[in-house]
Amino acid sequence: MTDLPWLSLLVALPLVGAAVTAALPAALAKRFALGTSLLTLVVGIAAASQFVIGSSEQFQLAEQYSWIPQLGVSWALGVDGISLALILMALVLAPVCMVAAWDDVPGGRSESTYFALLLSLVPFMVGVFAATDVFLFYVFFEAMLIPVYFLIGMYGGERRQYAAVKFLLYSLAGGLIMLVAVIGLYVVGPGGTDGFMIERLTGLDIAQDTERWLFLGFFIAFAIKAPMWPLHTWLPDAAAESRPAVATLLVGVLDKVGTYGMIRFCLQLFPEASQWATPVVVVLALVSIVYGAILAIGQSDMMRLIAFTSVSHFGFIVLGIFAFTSTAHAGSNLYMINHGFSTAALFLVAGMLIARRGSRRIDAYGGWQRVTPALAGVFLVAGLSALSLPGLSTFVSEFLVITGTFQRYPAAGVVASLGLVLSALYVLLMYKRVMTGPAPVVVEGAVTRLEGPDTGGQDLPYVRADLDEGVTPAQIGPVRDLGLREKVVVAPLLAALLVIGFFPKPVLDVLDPAVQRTLQVVGVSDPAHDAPADTASTHGSDH
């Protein structure tokens, strides 16, 4: 069992499945894509069962094959607790998004291509988190752009071409900067046929100025991907113009490559430069937290609002990474997992509302909890997870980040706490505007917002002009509460939010050895005035 190339199998299986999906008729294509994503999840769970918690090895399930020996490039995969948790999160979200996207595209070749592109994201998500060769990581990092570009540009909203090109330009710019740093890292590294292996590049004696320049090359690329202020402006456009399932995978999984890369490469390969850059990075993270939350409050577009909340949340993750305490670092790693499920719930439930109403504008809604109470309840839970309500998973991670930040940077902890207050404003205001108030008028299976007193269901003229541009009445779904397919979509997301919220210790136990190893490589420890911390998981279980 342990000799199987589990990680290569997780890359190959969905990649082959995507090619087959593209060639199948539409009705069969999406079923095959869903089946392949579920099979990949099963293989991922089987691979995770081979992982030994607390092992002294940095990477488990390791594979290494010579790929381009002349350049020192290897096909090298392996996982620690951080990458394993992120891979499993991605494998869970993939079939959830497949089911959510079931009716996104009309039948025909377009639908086959759509599901093939969705499935093709899976091998890149696995590869980018499992790569232990820096050049191989870069290949997966850039390859992810291709399906996302086409998913936005071919199947997005009215401004899809603008959003897709903006996403591509930002990502390519960051990738090219990182490529220069990757080449520079090889030049100062040990060389040889495996000169890009992370283990061989860790602990190098690099000149201070050189190390700092290399750090900046990697960090800028990851800050764009994360996304951090002021390099975040591509995200609201990309998320708003994407299909909800695409936005979920983009923000919930692919953007985690930015914060994961900061941990895996910036901190591990350039420890001195990481500490040198910490004051600036902490300030940027705090600006992201407050700025993203304030802009979310002022949004009139539901999808853009959710995108700006993620700018704020990624600020918390980056703050925890560069606070350099075991508590904050563990919180950041857990935050990446929790944010994936929380954001998925928000985007997908928002997509269900848009499919019924035909508009992303918040002011086009009102009173929906009276006609769709179950949908309103799920929307509320998803929103409460975004504001870190105790009992939901995001509370644990956000609490750990703020607590750990206070240990080293009390002033930064105070500013970050402001994000908690602002998050309550943007979530509760959105829920109030969308779900409360007079019941909307339902006419011929469609719905419009009712201005004035509740008419008790009186048949009033339906105003077709309040649809989004490019949306026709025929594209609006029936006004109904959650159907079976939609319940299948939201059930695993709500379960993850509740289970991890009430019992985070198993996940923290998986993350903890990698957290401690990273802090040891950087050469930092918890502030002396704190009680000794056995493990980050101890912090999590105590709180």
Image (spheres, rainbow, N blue to C red):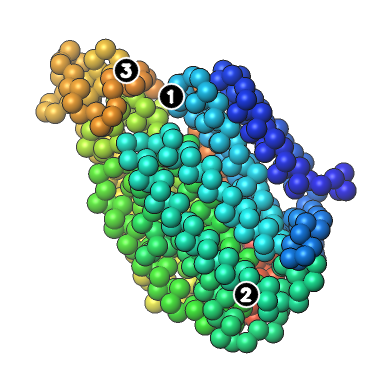
Residue 76 in percent (x, y) is at 76, 57
- Local secondary structure at mark 2: helix
> Circle 2 is placed at which residue position?
184
At x 53%, y 49%, the residue is 145
| Image point (37%, 27%), residue name | 355
Rendered-image quadrant of the C terminus: bottom right
Q: Nearer the viewer, mark 3 or mark 2?
A: 2
- Could you say where residue 117 lies in the image, as x and y percent from the top left? 56, 36
- The tag earlier along the polypeptide, 1 or 3, is 3
Please report whichever mark, 2 or 1, sits nearer to the chain's N-terminal start.
Answer: 2
Residue 368 in the image: above or below residue 11: above
Q: Which mark is residue 474?
A: 3
Front residue of 142 and 269: 142
Secondary structure beneath disc 1?
Answer: loop
Determine which quarter of the picture holds residue 153: top left
Q: Amino acid at mark 2?
A: Gly
Position of residue 340 relative to residue 259, above or below, is: above
How many circles with numbers are drawn on the protein? 3
- Label 3 is placed on what type of residue? Ala
Task: Identify the image quadrant of the N terminus.
Answer: top right
The residue sitting at 31% across, 46% down in the picture is: 428
Disc number for residue 46: none
Measured Cα–Cα span from mark 3 to mark 2: 55 Å
Q: Which residue is mark 1?
A: 482
